[in-house]
Image: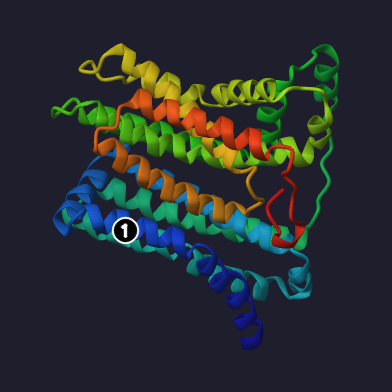
Amino acid sequence: MKALGKVFLRVFVTEYYRVNFGFFLLVAGICFGFLRAPEHKALAEAFVSSSFLLLIPLTVWLIYSFKVITFNNLLLIKHENNFLFHASTLPRFQLIQHISMISFLQLMPASVYGLFLILTALKVKAILSLALIILALVILHALIIWRTINAILKPDVGRKVSTLKNKIDGWFTKPFIWFYPEWIFRQQPLLVIGTKVFSCLLIIGISHFYLFDTYDERFMAMGCVLAYSSNLVLVFYYHRFENFHFAFFRGLPFGLMKRGVNFLITVFILSLFESIVLLRYYPEQLHVIYYVLLILLALSIYAIGYACLFIKDITLEFFIQKVGIAAFIWIILILFKVPLPVFIAVHFLMAYIVYRKNFYAFEFNSAIGSDK
């Protein structure tokens, strides 16, 4: 029993923190490099004092839980980890016990900050926020346990297309730009919903700061950079969809420009949630032209992220680390007042050069086990 527990800890927990070491180092640098202890306390009190603001950490925890679930699923489909499926022969109580310990350790960063919020809620006597925090952490732990156990007990489960879906598909001819949105909503519905909720709440939160103090457009641009960067996970899966699941599209006689335009239209459709929320809560102090620039900023971020995926096949975890570093650099450049039109133009130019140079030379490397 103890030996089995050590195997699970090494395979799931140790490997998880090893792969995501750069991500946690970046988060620690942002959280503790820019915010001091009094500011952390003030932020925590703001979260627990408002049910609406409390949605921000809850959404971050939800996305983090999706990250854990995705990692566990990817771990289980690797050939060297096929032995883990023998755990399905364990008594259910023992299996739940082992996976519960894994979930607890993988969700430790969220749990630690949750404990900090719980203590803050007790201090200010915010009973509703206290209950919501505890409930959210319990649900997220249960979600990770359920999805991981389900992946062990039921690998490669087939899916049946409903009769209604078959009839609808027969009535309407779908354009190509709709293929990926439908596919990603089927494959990763929680990831899509969590990403959209996080980015929209972040935009709303940044916009609300303009109601109480005076900020220039750079503050909004920094918030949008973080919101748009979170959507690069969807860009990663678009790249996998177009070049692996829908691979015959690479052989069709379409020019690079048409392929690039199809990509931009697709990600623009997926970003309509953020665009609508940004328009709804757009600060009155900022010129309307800056709204257009922020939309172009989003497309340029997606374009450079998409183009870089053709340089070399990488895993989702490594791509997220690179996105975190890039977002940090973008924020620094905005702080140093780099004009947004220049920012956007350089992004699109670099994306075009990288995309044109690497598109036809790209190939998947099965040895690294990248998510497809």
- Res. 256 image quadrant: top right
Residue 106 sits above or below residue 321 on the image: below
State the image coordinates of residue 40 (x, y, percent, origin top left): 21, 54
Q: Position of residue 94 (x, y in %)?
A: 66, 76
Residue drawn at 33 percent across, 29 percent down: 204
Q: Nearer the viewer, residue 67 or 253?
A: 253
For the residue marked with disc 1, what is the amino acid?
Gly
Instruction: Tell me: residue 49, above or below residue 100.
Output: above
Q: Which residue is painted at 56% across and 42% down in the image? A: 233
Residue in the picture at 50% in, 26% down:
299
- Give the structural element (helix, strand or loop) at label 1: helix
Does residue 143 appear in the picture of this structure?
Answer: no
- What coloring was used for the rendering? rainbow
Please name the residue shown 67% across and 40% down the image: 358
- Closer-to-camera residue (218/122): 218
Q: Is 92 on the left-hand or right-hand side of 164?
A: left
Q: Quadrant of residue 147?
A: bottom right
Q: Position of residue 276 (x, y in %)?
A: 43, 19
Total labels: the figure holds 1
In this picture, is 337 found above or below 332? above
How would you rate the neighbour count of disc 1 (Cα within 10 Å): few for under 14, some for 14-19, many for 20 or more?
few
Residue 251 quadrant:
top right
- The answer to which of 278 and 363 lies nearer the viewer is 363
- The residue singled out by tag 1 in the image is 29
In which quadrant of the rendered image does the N terminus lie? bottom right
| Left or right position of 329 against 174 | left
The reply to whether residue 264 is in sight is yes
Q: Position of residue 372 (x, y in %)?
A: 72, 48
